[in-house]
Image (tube, rainbow, N blue to C red):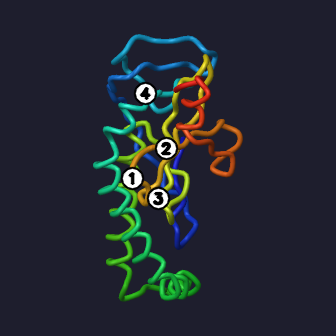
């Protein structure tokens, strides 16, 4: 099951299993398409894809959620030394006065990440808020790429190249390739 690792402890934060209905074309990894709005559970091999317009419409919501991810991550990192000390002493009763606050921040961080992932958006970097939107281009899946310091979605990359392989959407449009 997909998940995110906690930025301060390295523990895996697992998504709750769920089914959701999302209005978008789905493409199975084998390349076959499904009808819009079909049920998809988190364990399937299907990937929700976004048009540029659909992805762009999520930017205001993602800005808020990624702001929450960032602030909760910072709080967790700030508590790391104390929490690590408590973990080292766990066999002796451990504990920390920050324990309850740490759990509160961890839950808020996890819930924000889960909400982003439930939209079909992939969180690639918690620190910078980098996210990818699966997108169908010329019969294959690529990623539209965005981070909160960018005004709009202006980049894309192949699934296997990551952010380092980002290409400008405008360059492709100028060349007649279009997305």
Q: Which residue is mark 1?
A: 151
Q: Which residue is mark 3?
A: 129
**Real-space Cα distance between discs 1 and 3?**
13 Å
Query: Regarding mark 3 in the picture, which secondary structure is present there?
Result: loop
Residue at x 44% of width, y 29% of height: 50
Question: Mark 3 against mark 4, which lies toward the viewer?
Answer: 4
Residue at x 57% of width, y 31% of height: 174
Query: Residue 174 — which label?
Result: none
Which of the two discs, 4 and 1, labels the residue nearer the N terminus?
4
**Real-space Cα distance between discs 3 and 4?**
20 Å
Q: Where's residue 136, x and y in %? A: 54, 24
Residue at x 36% of width, y 39% of height: 56
Give the image quarter of residue 71: bottom left
Which of the two discs, 1 and 3, labels the residue nearer the N terminus?
3
CB of mark 2 within 8 Å of CB of mark 1?
yes
**Real-space Cα distance between discs 4 and 1?**
17 Å
Query: Residue 51 — which label?
Result: 4
Query: Regarding mark 1 in the picture, which secondary structure is present there?
Result: loop
**Is 35 left, or right, of 3 in this rendering?**
left
Question: Mark 4 against mark 1, which lies toward the viewer?
Answer: 1
**Is 82 left, or right, of 18 in this rendering?**
right
């Amino acid at each position: 099951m997909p998940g995110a690792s906690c930025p301060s402890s390295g523990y895996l934060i697992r998504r709750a299993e769920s089914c959701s209905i999302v209005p978008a074309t789905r493409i199975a990894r084998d390349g076959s398409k499904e009808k819009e709005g079909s049920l998809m559970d988190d364990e399937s091999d299907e990937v929700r894809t976004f048009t540029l317009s659909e992805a762009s419409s999520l930017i205001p919501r993602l800005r808020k959620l990624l702001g929450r991810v960032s602030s909760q991550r910072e709080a967790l990192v700030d508590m790391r030394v104390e929490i690590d000390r408590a973990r080292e002493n766990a066999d002796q009763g451990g504990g920390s006065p920050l324990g309850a606050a740490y759990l509160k921040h961890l839950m808020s961080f996890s819930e924000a990440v889960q909400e982003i992932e439930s939209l079909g958006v992939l969180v690639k970097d918690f620190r910078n808020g980098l996210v990818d939107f699966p997108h169908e281009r010329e019969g294959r899946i690529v990623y539209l790429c965005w981070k909160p310091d960018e005004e709009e979605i202006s980049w894309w990359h192949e699934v296997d190249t990551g952010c380092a392989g980002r290409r400008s959407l405008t360059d492709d449009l100028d060349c007649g390739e279009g997305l």
